[in-house]
Structures are given as structure tokens and as C-alpha cells.
Image (cartoon, rainbow, N blue to C red):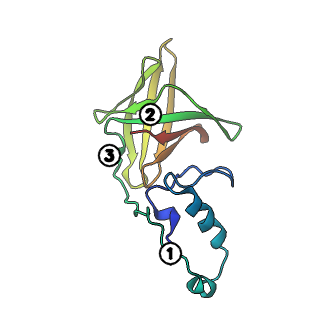
Amino acid sequence: MLSNCQTCKFCLDEQHHSTDIGCAVNPEYWEMWKRLQSLTTEVMVRLPIYDCQDYQERTHVTLTALVNNTLWQVGAVEAGRQRAYHSVPWKFCPDGTVSASDLWRGVWQKIDVEVWSIGVAIVHQKGNTDCFSVVFSPYGQSFTAFKERKEYRIGKLIT
């Protein structure tokens, strides 16, 4: 039977276009899996399709693990579209601090552990401040930051 790519730990969460690569290890299997999703179960069981050899089931992560000295590649969202990732990663620390090198420093606090969300307040180099919320994906590979109820930043886990 066909492996479910969406439950694999190598599946990339950020699928914004139909041409985005969905698998970090086996992109060919991802492409085949997407095409075969339209088939009925009766047809699927008759096809000689095997499990992906690289498949490893994802496990949910805790919010604590997501802010334990983790680095995130982050890009702005403008007019509903993601822009390029910034060259300086964000770092979340377990002591409640967050930073982007010397560009800004801030603090975070848990909002809702059940939906992996935190509130963030930062101070930029020049003294101006920002406040926003961050909602992590259940598998901990990405996050979306919201400011004034709109998508503000998109993050992808580095380490």
C-alpha cells in the first residue's frame, strides 16, 4: 500500500504552489503520491505500488521543544504572499527570550500549549517595538506569525 507522505517526517509543510517539492528525501515518490490520491481504494489495492523506503512517521512535538534553542529561517508575508527568507535566523530560547542576532531582541510567553502558540514582544536596534503571535505547526517544522490578525511572517525550522 502507498505510504502517506503527509504523515512522514520528511514532508515539507510549506506547500504554497502545486510545483513545490513536498519531500526532502524522495521527491519522486511525492510526485507519484500526489497523482495517485485521486484514485479509488479499489484501484489502489490492485496497483503494484510499494511503500516509500524513506518513510518515517512524524511525531507531534511539544511547545517546549520548539522554543528550546531552536533556529528558524523566517520570511515576511506581504499582501498574502511569502517573500524571500531573511538571511538572519530567529532563535527561540527556553528562558523566554527570542532574537534575530543583533537586529532585535525580545521575549516570548505561552498563549495556548494545545495549539502550539506563543506571544512575542521585540525591541529593534533603533528602539521601536513589535508584538505578534506565533503558531507552530503540530509537527514543529514551521510556524506562522500573526500581527493584527494577519499573516506577518512564515518560519521554517533550521535546527
Q: Position of residue 21 (x, y in %)?
A: 60, 51
Q: Position of residue 58 (x, y in %)?
A: 40, 60
What's under tag 3, amino acid-wise?
Answer: Ala
Q: Distance from label 3 to label 1 (Cα)?
A: 34 Å
Please tell me whether mark 3 or mark 1 is closer to you in this view.
1
**Front residue of this view, candidates 68 and 24:** 24
Q: Which residue is mark 1?
A: 50
Please tell me whether mark 1 or mark 2 is closer to you in this view.
1
Q: Quadrant of the C terminus?
A: top left
Q: Helix or strand or loop: what does disc 1 sit on?
A: loop
**Is residue 15 placed above or below 51 in the rendered structure?**
above
Q: Helix or strand or loop: what does disc 3 sit on?
A: helix
Q: Which residue is mark 2?
A: 120
Q: Helix or strand or loop: what does disc 2 sit on?
A: strand
Q: Residue at x 42, y 41 (%)?
A: 118
Q: Position of residue 73 (x, y in %)?
A: 49, 35
Could you tell which of marks 1 and 2 lies nearer the N-terminus?
A: 1
Please tell me whether mark 2 or mark 3 is closer to you in this view.
3
Q: Residue at x 56, y 80 (%)?
A: 48
Q: Which residue is mark 3?
A: 65
**Front residue of this view, candidates 38 and 63:** 38
Q: Distance from label 2 to label 3 (Cα)?
A: 17 Å
What's under tag 2, amino acid-wise?
Answer: Val
